[in-house]
Image: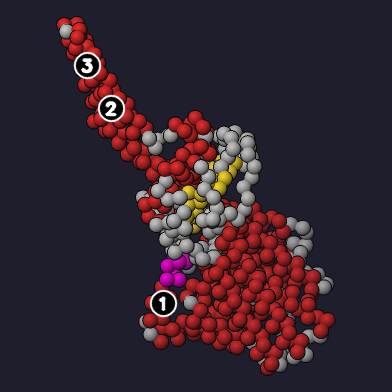
Amino acid sequence: MAHDAVIERWPVARRGGRARYALGVAVLAAVYYGAAQIGVELNFVGPVAAIVWPPVGVGIAFLYLRGLSYWPGVLAGDLLANDYSALPLSSAAGQTFGNVLEVLVAVVLIRRLVPGGAPLESRRGLAGLLVAFAAGTAVSATIGATSLWLGGVVPADSVATVWRTWWLGDFCGALIVVPLALAWAQPPQRWWRSRRTLEAAVVLVAVAALSDFASRSHRPVVYLMFPALIWAALRFGQRGATLAVAIAVSVTLWNTSHLVGPFVFRSIDRSVLNTQLFVTVSALSTLVLAAVMSERSELARGLRASRARLVKAGDVERRRLERNLHDGAQQRLTWLAVDLSHAAERARESPEQAASLFEDAEKKLELAIAELRELAHGIHPAVLTDLGLGSAIRSVALRSTIPINVIEVPAGRVDESAEAAAYYVFAEAVTNAQKHSRASSIGVRATAGPRTVRIEVVDDGVGGATDAAGSGLQGLRDRVQAAGGAFEVESISGRGTRIVAVIPMSDARSRVGRPRPGWRPNRSERREP
C-alpha cells in the first residue's frame, strides 16, 4: 500500500537519534501552526470555531504515518496557534488538550479499525477512517465547547451550536488533509510522467475553474463541479480524487470566506453549516468513488493472477494425466490387446488352453480398470454426480482419519457447478486439516439459499493456515472466485481454522432453507452417519 512503507520506516528514524526525532517534532509543530493560520484566513466565525480546521488533519496524518511518539509536535503547534488575546488562558488550555487528544484518539482508532493499513483502498477501510474521524473530532468538540462555556466565552444556549460547528469543522479538516497525505505519501507512479500528465493537468484545471465559477455564483450551479471530481476519481484514483477535492474545497472556502457565492447568507450559522455540509458531501462522494475504483482494480488484478494460476495448474494436471495414462493404463491396455490377439491364435490351435488364456486377460483388464479408477479418483467423484453434495460429504466423513461432525447438508440436489466447487472446498479443507492441523474434530455445514451454496469447514487444530502463493488454499480461492463466489480463511494460531466459501448457483433456484448464523463446531455434537 502507498503509505505502508512510510509507516514501517518511522521506528528506524526514531533509532536514528534524538536530533532526528526533535526535527520531526519541530516540523510537525511548524506545519500544524501553518495549517492553523490557513484555517484562520478561511474563517469568518471568530475564535471559537472554524468552518474547516486543517491542523487536525495535519496532526492525524503525521502521527499515523510517523508514529504516536511525535504527539509533542501537535501540542507545540496548537499552543502556538491559540489566540490568547480572545480567549481566557483556561479555555485556551482546554482547547489544546482537546485538540491533542482528538488526534491521538483518531490515530489509534484508524489503526484498530483499518488493520491492513490501507484506509483509502476499500469501502470498509474508508468507513473505518470516517468512524475514527467522527470519534476523535467529537472528543475535541466536546472538550473545546465545554471549555469555552466554563470560561465565559459563549453562553450556555450557544454550546450546542458551537459544538456542531467545531465538530464539523474538525471533521472536514481531517476529511480533506488526511486522505491527501495518505494518497501522496509515496512518489507518483510512472504514468504521471507519461501522456496522462496532460490529462491530469486538464482535470485539475477543470476542477479549479468549475469550482470557482460555481462558488462565485448565487445561482444553484454548485453541482457543476461534480463531473470534474468524478473524472479525477475514475481516471486517477486516490491521488487524483484527493487532490481534486483539496482544490475544489479550497476554492469554495476562499470565495465563501470573502462573502461570495451560494453559501453566504445573512445568518452566519446557516452559512457555516451549508458550507461544511457541502465540503463533507463533495469529499465523501469523491473518496467513496475512488475507493470503489481501487477495489475494482484490485479485484481485476486478483482475477488476472487467479486465471493465470488456474491455467497453469490445469496444464500441469493435464500433463500429469497424460503421463500417467501413457505410462500406466494405456500401456497395459495396449499389451492386453496384443495378449488377446495371441490368445485367440493359441485358442484356435489349442482350444483346451482358451479358458486359462482368457482368465489371464480378464485379470489384466481388471488391473487396467483399477488404474483408470485411481486416476479418476479426486477429479469428480461418482457419488457427487449420482447422489449430490450431501452424500459426497458424508462419504468423505466416513473415510476421514479425524472425526467429522456433519452439522447440516442440503437435503436435495442443487446446481451442479456450485455442488462441485463446494465439494472441492470441503475436500481440500479436510485434507489440509488431516495433514497439518493436528485437530481432534472437524465441523462442516453446507447450506443452499435462493442463489448461493454456502459451505463452512471449521477445525479445532493449531491454526496458522494461510492462502499464500502456491498453497492449496490459494487454489481453492482461485476456484471459488473463478465461479464468481467469495472465499474467506480465518486461522489464528492456537485457535483452529475456519474456511467459508459462498458459491453462486447458475440456475438461482433454492431447494433447501437458509443457514443459521453464528455456528461453530462442537465436540459434543453428534457425528452423522
Determine which of the numbered discs, if any, sits on residue 34 in the image: none
Where residue 363 appears, as percent x and y from the top left, is: 26, 23
Tag 1: residue type?
A: Pro
Q: Residues within 10 Å of mark 3 (few under 14, many from 20)?
A: few
Q: Where is residue 1 in the image (x, y as percent from the top left)?
A: 46, 62
**Which of the 4 image quadrants contains residue 353?**
top left
Q: Give the range drawn in magenta.
A: 3-8
- Tell which residue pokes out farthest to the top in this image: 348
Q: Mark 1 points at which residue?
A: 11
Residue 66 placement, left or right of 435: right
* Spatial separation of the CA atoms under disc 3 and disc 2: 17 Å
Q: Which of 303 and 181 is in front in this view?
A: 303
Mark 3 — residue?
Answer: 356
Label 1 CA crowd tier, 10 Å (few <14, some 14–19, many 20+): few
The residue at which mark 2 appears reads as 367
Q: Which amino acid does label 2 sit on?
A: Leu
- Decide which of tag 2 and tag 1 comes sooner along the chain: 1
Give the residue at x 54% y 73%.
61
Query: Looking at the image, is mark 1 or mark 3 earlier in the sequence?
Result: 1
Lower position in the chain sequence, tag 3 or tag 2: 3
In the rendered image, the vertical position of residue 77 relative to residue 395, given as above or below: below
How would you classify the magenta stretch by its main secondary structure? Answer: helix
Which sits in the foreground, 46 or 394?
A: 394
What crowding class fits label 2: few (fewer than 14 Cα within 10 Å), some (14-19), or many (20 or more)? some
Image side of residue 283 versus residue 262, left or right: left
Q: Pointers 2 and 1 in contact (CB under 8 A)?
A: no
Residue type beneath disc 3: Ser
Q: Is mark 3 on a helix, strand or loop?
A: helix
Q: Which of marks 3 and 2 is in front?
A: 3
